[in-house]
Amino acid sequence: MKIFSMPADYRKETIDRYAELNKVYPDCKLAHTYGNISVSNPFGSGRNINKLPPVGMEQLAEYVSYSSSHGIEFHYTLNPSYLQNREFTAEGVKEIKKVLDQLHEAGVRMLIIAMPSLMELVRSMGDKFQFKASAICQITNANKAMFFKRLGASSMVVDETINREFDTLLRICDVFGENVQVIVNSICHQDCQFRMFHYNQISGDSVSAFNEVSGAYYPMRCGMRMYEDLSSCFKTTWVRPEDLHYYREVGVQSFKLQGRAWVLTGDPIRAVESYFKEHYDGDLKHLLWLFAPNDQFRLNLDNRLLDGFLKPFFDQPGFCHRDCSVCDYCEQWARKCFGDETARKTAQGAVAMIKQLDPFRRMIEALPGKQ
């Protein structure tokens, strides 16, 4: 059976529709939704607060209860990458345990955690919670997977950078077991140089205050990279619905769709059903964004044109050496899918617009230092 996790929108009608999908597709199950409170949240998570649904502890408790009554679990994202070292102070530990007690009273039993120190803290509270190792743990090999298993993780999300390394995924499943999860709609560049710094920025902007400059910095630079080199679109490690069978062959049975920032304006039901069906016709980028209207410069990426793209990654271990200077595989696919003049003009317009709107660039240029 294929198991799926979706970002919570905290709407009862969405849970009703997920439950119906579970009845229609007996070989698939929407087993979990995930998220965290965004009202009076003292510890943050892996998403900027301004992008999250406004949810407090009382509303969370109501949602968890309703979900549970429909056979759908809720996983709480307690996954900042940095807590300003508060977890290493007696006062901070007391505060964290107080919040954990409140979450337990709200019905939460599974936490998604990134920091080993928080995992140890949760373990100190006995059997109140199980926890999943977050994608922010950057688990990229079997040794890292085994570390988090020994630390107490009952499940884990692999780092998206290894989504196309099937030999590595096989080894991780061998050492960790069946509860290994892959993010299927990743939009991050493989081996993104900004990744660890972006996680830390989000940890700071996911509590009570949001900095417009820091919140725009990394998305704008990643967007710039995408439009300046259209082959970058193929170097993000998304997984098409049609290609789930490759993952199941190496032992991955659990799949996550990200998009807590898009779930309220998108169509999560349509998105997850496409993966249930293992078939989708249309612009793949629409699906990756859960059909939310997020990109005014979105280039059409016809999913049908991508048939066969992933096959050599599966058939030939080590197919991608992560050295684009000696390989033009993604360039070939970019020419196939984005080869017309319209796509190039769209990309050029996007680059110009991003440069014009970039608040960090405007700020540092307006505040010159001594020459």
Image (cartoon, rainbow, N blue to C red):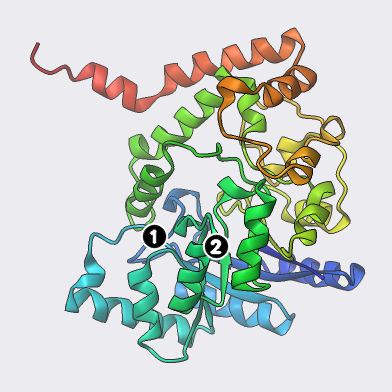
Please report the residue visible at 49 percent of the width from the left and 64 percent of the height from the top: 143
Residue type at numbered disc 2 = Ala
Q: Please tell me whether residue 203 is drawn above or below residue 34 in the rendered image.
A: above
Query: Which one is nearer the viewer's eye here, 196 or 271?
Result: 196
Residue 90 percent coordinates (x, y): 18, 79
Mark 1 to mark 2: distance in Å?
Answer: 23 Å
Residue type at numbered disc 1 = Pro
Whether residue 296 is visible here, answered yes or no, is no
Please report the residue visible at 83 percent of the width from the left and 71 percent of the height from the top: 22
Say which quadrant the C terminus sits in: top left
> Residue under circle 2?
142
Q: Residues within 10 Å of mark 2 (few under 14, many from 20)?
A: some
Residue 163 percent coordinates (x, y): 64, 49
Please report the residue visible at 43 percent of the width from the left and 76 percent of the height from the top: 151
Image disc number at residue 80: 1
Q: Residues within 10 Å of mark 1 (few under 14, many from 20)?
A: many
The count of marks equals: 2
Going by the image, does 236 lie left or right of 279? left
